[in-house]
Image (spheres, rainbow, N blue to C red):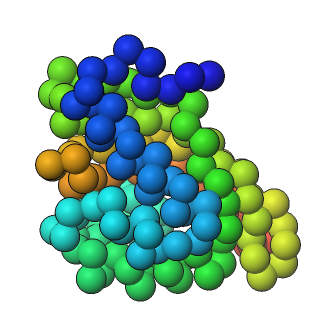
Amino acid sequence: MTVGHGLDEHRRRNLAAVESAFAAIGRGDAEGQLANYVDDLALEFPFTDPPKAVRSKTEALPYLSGAFGVFRFELVIDDVIACVDPDRLVIEAHSTGTYLPTGAAYVNRYVILFGFRDGLIATQREFFDPTQAMRSAGTFPV
């Protein structure tokens, strides 16, 4: 699937920030991921238990580094939905990867709402199935 087909130049620039961030995620590179974000970013994970919100690069770096120490995965964009506001995109994606402590497979699906400022990611609200991480870690209750 070709993603971003039909997007105007402004939206393509914003999508490029997401693609660069996703590439860094695939390398387990938190600093590389955050290079695509504004300093006062807002990352929200409403489906984690408890829900998590991160409000700056300073706060995000140890959070993401910790996650990349446990999970290594590739995010693939399945669809890009342009919003009326050119600085908003909705991304549907899926992941494949590994839970590093055991080598178990990790797969998930995501719907992510992105907001942009000056071509960088300013907000990211990420919806995914947190039970998939628990399944990979072997901690999902039966």
Give the residue furthest to the front: 9
Residue 39 placement (x, y as % from top left): 19, 70
Give the residue furthest to the top: 6
| Direction from residue 38 to residue 6 in the image, left or right | right
Residue 34 placement (x, y as % from top left): 36, 68
Q: Is residue 141 visible?
A: no
Residue 45 placement (x, y as % from top left): 39, 59
| Direction from residue 107 to residue 91 in the image, left or right | left
User: Which residue occupies 61% across, 67% down?
Assistant: 27
User: Which residue occupies 73% across, 59% down?
Assistant: 97
Which quarter of the rendered picture does the N terminus lie within?
top right
**Residue 16 lies in quadrant:** top left
| In front of the other: 122 or 126 | 122
| In front of the other: 16 or 51 | 16
Q: In the displayed structure, would residue 25 be above or below residue 55?
A: above
Q: Is residue 65 visible?
A: yes
Say how many tags the image has. 0
| Direction from residue 71 to residue 84 in the image, left or right | left
Give the residue furthest to the right: 103
Residue 43 placement (x, y as % from top left): 31, 61
**Residue 42 lies in quadrant:** bottom left
| Direction from residue 91 to residue 39 in the image, left or right | left
Q: In the displayed structure, would residue 69 be above or below residue 71?
A: below
**Residue 86 lies in quadrant:** top left
Which quarter of the rendered picture does the C terminus lie within?
bottom right
